[in-house]
Each structure stands twice: as structure tokens, then as C-alpha cells.
Amino acid sequence: MYLEKQSKASNDNTADSDIAQFQRVDGKELLSSAENFPFRIVHALDVEDLSLVTQLRQKSYGRHLPEFGKYLATPEEDDFDPENIVLLITAKLNDMPLATMRIHTNKNKKPLPLEHTIALPDSLRKSMLAEAVRFSVINGAEGRLPRDALFKAFYLTCSMLKIEWMVICARKPLQKLYYGLTFEDIFPDNEPIPFPHIGDIPHRVLKVRVGDVEKNWNAMNHPLYNFFFETRHPELDRLLEDLRLS
């Protein structure tokens, strides 16, 4: 793992006295500044949170897949599986749902959702994997920061869980967004694959190695490098602590 979790005592007297810091294996501290989000990021567990999750899913998917959006209007069985992690971002001002995703892992040899349709290469199936599904973000420019925060939450969660590969299914034209995050095609020579768990819409299957993200983004001067690796977000610190305790 390229990043190691460290604890560093804060010099201030706030309740956040143990600030979660990420350092490179060579000891260089990556985080150099702190920034608060105008929203909360939580592990959605109760009925109220899941109601906001499904509200956003229905709107997000319903813009392109109206019938599938109706199906997502209520929580799914997988939302209640303790092995999965449902993330929810809500505005601090009015609790409006802004972004959500559900993370599945194969830590207990359970197939990922995409594996009910396709067989992954042996090299991946033997690795620790996490798949993000039901990725939904509020429409328009106000969804950009929550989207980036959700990606960072996905990355940090995978790093904490010692996941080797993050995998996703992306429909056209959204695959360009993931290519920009250095995801690569698992089946580059194949046509997009229809997945029943995503409304039978053709998707590309993409992957990125968790341990390569920081060094590759640093080398290419990725526009989100500072956001991911040089800025501490207290809301994400609290999320990771909640996930460790859950």
C-alpha cells in the first residue's frame, strides 16, 4: 500500500484533537492544508438516510432511465447488507441529498454485483476488489464538489480496507470521467456490456489500482491531486472513523 495511516496530535483545542494524516511510505507528509466542506459525508444506515439516498437515486437515474429510476425509489436489499457501505452526502444548510454511492467488496469471497453478469480475469478475482454502484449526484454545477468528495471518500475507504483494485461500470459518455481519474478498461477489445443491475444499459468495466493513484497523479500533475492528497477534509476524517468503528 503506497499510503499509510498515521495519527498526529493537533496543536489546537478543538474536539478534533487527533487529526488523521496520510503520509507516503518514505515518510513525507502529503497533507498540507485543511478545508471544510459545506456538506456532511456519512455512512447511511438508518431509514431517514436511506430515504434521502433513494430520493437522489431516483432523480439521477430517472433522467436517463425513467422506469429504472422508479425501481430505485425504495431501498434495495443490498443497502441493508452490513458488508456493503452506502455513502451519502447532504448539505449542511438544509440536509438536501447531494451525492451517494454504495461500495461492495469481495473481502468475504462474495461476488461483486458485476460478477453476476461477467467473469473477471483471474488476476483480478484473486485480488481484493471494491465496486462502486448506484453512483448518483445532484444535477448541474453544484454537484461537482460533492462528486469529487465522493470519489475521494471511495478512494480513502478502499485504502483503509486494504483494497487493491477499485472497479466500476460506466456508461457512455460517463466513462470519460473515469478515464480522467486514470481508470482503465478491463476488457478493452470488447463492446460495452449490458448489466441487469444497471437497467440493462451497456457499460464499460473499468479498474484502477488503489496503490498507484497517488504516485501516478503526482507524476501527471493531475488537477485533483491537491484535493485528494494535500488537503485534509474533517468531514472525511469523521467518516473514516465511523467506518472503522462500525
Image (cartoon, rainbow, N blue to C red):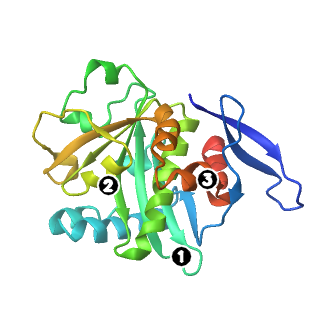
Residue 150: where, in percent of width, then height?
47, 56
Position of the N terminus, as image quadrant, is top right
Q: Quadrant of residue 195?
A: top left
Q: Mark 1 is on which residue type?
A: Asp
Which residue does the image show at 64% across and 49% down from the upper left?
A: 242
Dot 2 amino acid type: Leu
Residue receiving disc 2: 177
Left or right: where 244 falls relative to 212: right
Q: Position of residue 13 (x, y in %)?
A: 90, 61
The Cα atoms of the two marked residues, 1 and 2, are separated by 27 Å
| Of the pair 2 and 6, the residue shown nearer to us | 2
The quadrant where residue 60 appears? bottom left
Q: Residues within 10 Å of mark 1 (few under 14, many from 20)?
A: few
Residue type at mark 3 is Leu
Q: Is residue 2 left or right of residue 6?
A: left
Residue, disc 1: 95
Mark identifier at residue 239: 3
The spot of residue 139 in percent (x, y) is 34, 73
Q: Is residue 63 left or right of residue 202?
A: right
Graded by Cα atoms within 10 Å as few (under 14), some (14 to 19) or many (20 or more), the crowding at tag 3 reads: some
Disc 1 or 2, which lies upstream in sequence?
1
Does the image show residue 75?
A: no
What label does residue 142 carry, if any? Answer: none
- The answer to which of 160 and 227 lies nearer the viewer is 227
Q: Residue at x 32, y 19 (%)?
A: 123
Viewer-nearest of labels 3 and 2?
2
Q: Could you tell me residue 172's position as x and y percent? A: 18, 55
| Of callouts 3 and 1, the N-terminal one | 1
